[in-house]
Image (cartoon, rainbow, N blue to C red):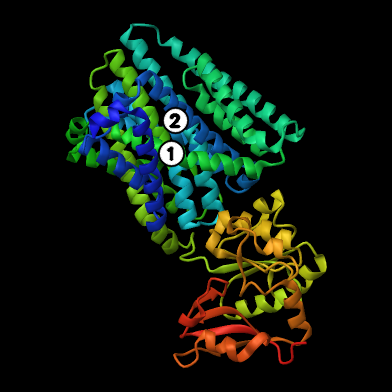
Amino acid sequence: MRELLIDHPALAIAAIIALGVGAQWLAWRIRVPAILPLLAVGFLVGPLLGWLTPTEVFPPDLFYPLVSMAVGLILFEGGLTLRFSELRNTRRVVINLVTWGALVTWLCGAAAAYFVAGLSVQLAFLFGALVIVTGPTVIAPLLRIVRPNANVASVLKWESIVIDAVGALVAVLVLEAVVLLSRDEPLFSIVLLLGRFVLVGSAVGAAGGVALSWLLRKRALPDYLINVTALALLFATFSLANVFSSEAGLLAAVVMGILVANTGVPGLDSLLSFKEDLTVLLVSMLFIALAANVELSTFVAALSWQTALLLALVMFVIRPLDVYLSSIGSRLLASERLFIAWVGPRGIVAASVTSLFAVRLRTVGIEGADQLVPLVFIVIVGTVLVASLTAKPLGVRLGVADPDPQGVLLLGAHPMARQIAGVLDELGVKVLLADTNASNVTEAQAAGLMTYHGSLLSDASDDRLRLAGIGRLLALTSNDEANALTAVKFGREFGKANVYQLAPRTHDDHNKRLGGEHRGRWLSNEELSFERLESLRRAGATIERTELSEELSLADYLTEGGDGVVPLFLVDGKDVRVVSDETDAERETSGSVVALVAPDLT
C-alpha cells in the first residue's frame, strides 16, 4: 500500500479526502469534535500502519506552503463569524485572554516544558508559544454540541480565532530568536520582526478586507463569481503578507475576515457557507496528513509520565490560571469562568505550525527539534479528548448549557401561532415567537409569551436573538418564501432535522416539489398550509390531547378524525416531538398526540 500511494500521488490525495470525509461522518454520528477521529485515522494510516507519509508522496516545498494556505483559509472563515456586537458583555475578558493571558500561558507552558519535559530553553519557549492557541476547528464543533449561553459562547469563539494569530506571532518570534541565536545575530532583530509582523499582517489584511467589502457592497461581481473571487483575494492577501513577514498571513487572514464580517456587506451568508464547506474539507485533509507525518519512534519516545504531567499542567493549572486572571472584574459568573477554564482544546494551527517549525529547526540544526512535534500532538489529543467527553455534562452541571434544547422558535405570532405556543408552554417547552407585526407581538406578550419583534432573516436577529434552550423552529407565516428561507437559515443552527414549516399553498405545486435542502420538514403533513391552518381556526378548531395505545395508534386516530384532525406534537413524558411528513403514524402507539381538532370543517 505504501509503495502504491508513493507512486500515485493522485491516489494518495483521493485516499486522504475519502478518509477525512469518513472521519467527519463518524464524528457527526457519535457527536464528538471531528479532530478526534481525524487524528486517529491519521495516526493509523501513518505512524501505525506505515501506509502514508505525506512528505514522501508530495515534495515538502509544496506540501508545507499548501498547509499554511489552508490554515489561512480556516482563520479567514473564522474571522467571518466574528461580530463586534457579540462582545457587549465579554469584550474585556476576550482582550485579556488574547493579550497578557496569552503571555501567562506562554511563560507557564515554557516553564513546564523545561522543568518537567526536559526540553532545552529555546524549545521550551517555542512549546509554550505553540500551546497558546485553542482554535476554531475544535471550539466551533464543541459549541454546536454543548450550546452554552451567550457569554460563554462569545468568549470561547472570539478567543479561539484571535488567539490563533497571536499564538502564531509569538511562535514566529520565538522561532526567529532561536534561529538568530544559532547564528550569533543580535536579538534586537526580534523587535523589528515583531513590528513588521503586526504592521504587515494588519495592513495587508485590512487592505484585502476593504477590497472584498467594496466589491460586495458595490455588487461589482455576479453571484457565481463572489465565492471564487473572495477565495482568490484571500490567498493573494495571505501570500503577500507572508512575503513581507514570515507567517504574517495568519494575522492578515483574521483581520480580513473580521473586517468583512463587520461592514454590513450583502451576501455574507452565502460566502460564509462556501467557506465553511471548504474548511470542512481542508480540516479533514490537514489533520490526517499532519498526523500521518508524525514519526512513530519519536511519538512513542515522548510517551512518559513526564509528558502526562506536562499535559495535566497545561489543562488543569495553566489554562485555569489564564482564565482566572483574565476574567478578574468581569461580569462572568463563577460557573461561566469555570467552564471556560475547562474548555481549552488545541487545534489545527498548533498542529500545522508545529510541523512547519520542526522542518525549519531541523534545517538549521537545532538539537531536540524532533521532540517538539509529538509533545504538541499529545497536548492536542489530550485537550480535545477531555473537552469533547466532558464539556457537555459539565456545562449542564454548571448551568451554562442545556442538556437537550427542546425549546421552539415560532416564526409568526398570529392567533393560531399563539394558540400553538400556549400549548407548548403548558407542556413545559420553552417558546419564543418572532414576528414583524407589532400588533401580533403585543398580543403574544399580553398572553405571557416570550417574543422577538423583527425579521429572523435580518443580520440584526443574529445579534439580538437569545436562543439558549431553543433547538427547533416552526415556520408558520403566510409567506412561503420567508418560511423556507428561515428554515434554511436555522437548519445550520439547529440541524435540518429540527426545522419545520407549513407546506406552500395548495395550488403551488412547484414549491411543494422543492428539495429538502431548500426548505424545512413539512409540519404535520404536506397538506398543512397556512390556508388550511386559517380555515381550521375559522372553523373553531381547538387543540386537544389524546392518549395513544396499541389499540389506538396515531394512524388509527387520524383515520377516525379525517380532515378535521391535524396532528402537531407527540408527547411521551417530558419528551415532546414535532409531527412531520416523515413521522411513521403506524409505529406511534404510546404517549399522546396533541392535535388541532375542528368540530365542523367547512
Work out whether mark 2 precedes mark 1 in sequence or the reverse, and give the earlier one: 2
Residue 361 placement (x, y as % from top left) = 31, 18
Q: Quadrant of the N terminus?
A: top left
* Quarter of the image that includes the C terminus: bottom right
Seen in the picture, residue 365 relative to 407 is either above or below; the reply is above
The picture quadrant where one finds residue 284 is top left
Horizontally, is 196 left or right of 111 in the view?
A: right
Q: Which residue is mark 1?
A: 283
25 up-or-down from 76: above or below? below
Seen at 52% across and 33% down, the residue is 73
Q: Which mark is residue 74?
A: none
Residue 409 sits in quarter: bottom right
The secondary element bearing badge 2 is classed as helix
Looking at the picture, how far across and down is residue 355, in whole percent?
A: 34, 27
Q: Looking at the picture, which amino acid does disc 1 mark?
A: Val
- The local crowd at label 2, few if under 14, some if 14 to 19, many if 20 or more residues have their Cα within 10 Å, is many
Residue in the picture at 33% in, 7% down: 183
Residue indicated by mark 2 = 167
The amino acid at mark 2 is Gly
Q: Residues within 10 Å of mark 1 (few under 14, many from 20)?
A: many
Nearer-the-camera pick, 359 or 225: 225
Confirm whether residue 345 shows in the render.
Answer: no
Q: Residue at x 44, y 90 (%)?
A: 550
Measure how far apart labels 2 and 1 are at the Cα level.
19 Å
Name the element at disc 1. helix
Closer to us: 277 or 394 = 277
Q: Nearer the viewer, residue 27 or 133?
A: 27
Q: Is residue 304 left or right of residue 261?
A: left
